[in-house]
Image (cartoon, helix red, strand yellow):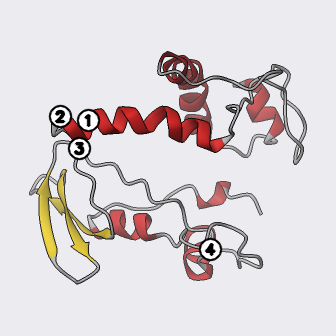
């Protein structure tokens, strides 16, 4: 924890860093239990861009990101087969379903043809990829102008807008590295 805070010059959000640090080792163990194999010579202390950590903590699979994909796809497939998860292709989340107590209870999905379908759920995960390719969303969240849109082109902030539409709010823009 202290090493991460030091490297960030104490600009990282301490609550998020603490949660990350406390869950990093169990996550790595979980991936290993699923069959993820770390590249030879790793973990390492860093990979350019900033000072290195004191303790080796970066690792990749032998096929980089594809290693994670190959590890998680069978897990997802088991959940799909059991009926616990439904995968919808060419479909986006149009809005979150919120009850009177302001708890999210599902999602309204919209297909490419515009058909909307409501799904009830005990838990909803918004995994939308950020906002770094949207100049408008960057300005809204950070208060600064985005001069270079180098992020994945689909990182438009749709997940943030979805959360706001359900009564949530965005915080942490002050921690955005410029």
Q: Is residue 134 above or below residue 54?
A: below
Left or right: residue 177 compared with residue 143: right
- Which mark, by number, is residue 85? 3
Left or right: residue 114 compared with residue 136: left
- CA separation, marks 3 and 4? 29 Å
Badge 4 is on which residue? 133
**Rendered residue at 24%/41% (across/down):** 80
Which quadrant, please, contains the C terminus? bottom right
Q: Earlier in the sequence, mark 1 or mark 3?
A: 1
Q: Are marks 2 and 1 in contact (CB under 8 Å)?
A: yes
Q: Earlier in the sequence, mark 4 or mark 2?
A: 2
Q: Is residue 45 above or below residue 158?
A: above
In-front residue for pair 114/24: 114
Q: Position of residue 171 (x, y in %)?
A: 50, 57
Q: Earlier in the sequence, mark 4 or mark 1?
A: 1
- CA separation, marks 4 and 1? 32 Å
Residue 44 sits in quarter? top right
**Rendered residue at 52%/37% (across/down):** 70
């Amino acid at each position: 924890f202290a090493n991460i805070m030091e490297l960030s010059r104490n600009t990282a959000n301490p609550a998020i860093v603490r949660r990350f640090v406390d869950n990093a080792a169990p996550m790595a163990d979980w991936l290993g239990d699923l069959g993820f194999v770390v590249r030879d010579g790793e973990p390492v202390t860093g990979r350019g861009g900033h000072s290195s950590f004191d303790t080796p903590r970066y690792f990749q699979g032998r096929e980089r990101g594809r290693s994670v994909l190959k590890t998680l796809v069978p897990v997802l497939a088991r959940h799909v087969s059991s009926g616990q998860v439904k995968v919808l292709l060419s479909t986006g989340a149009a809005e979150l379903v919120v009850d009177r107590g302001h708890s999210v209870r599902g999602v309204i999905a919209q297909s490419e043809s515009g058909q909307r379908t409501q799904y009830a759920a005990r838990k909803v995960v918004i995994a939308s990829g950020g906002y770094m390719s949207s100049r408008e969303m960057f300005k809204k969240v950070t208060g600064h102008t985005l001069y270079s849109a180098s992020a994945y082109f689909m990182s438009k902030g749709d997940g943030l807008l979805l959360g706001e539409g359900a009564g949530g709010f965005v915080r942490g823009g002050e921690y955005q590295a410029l």
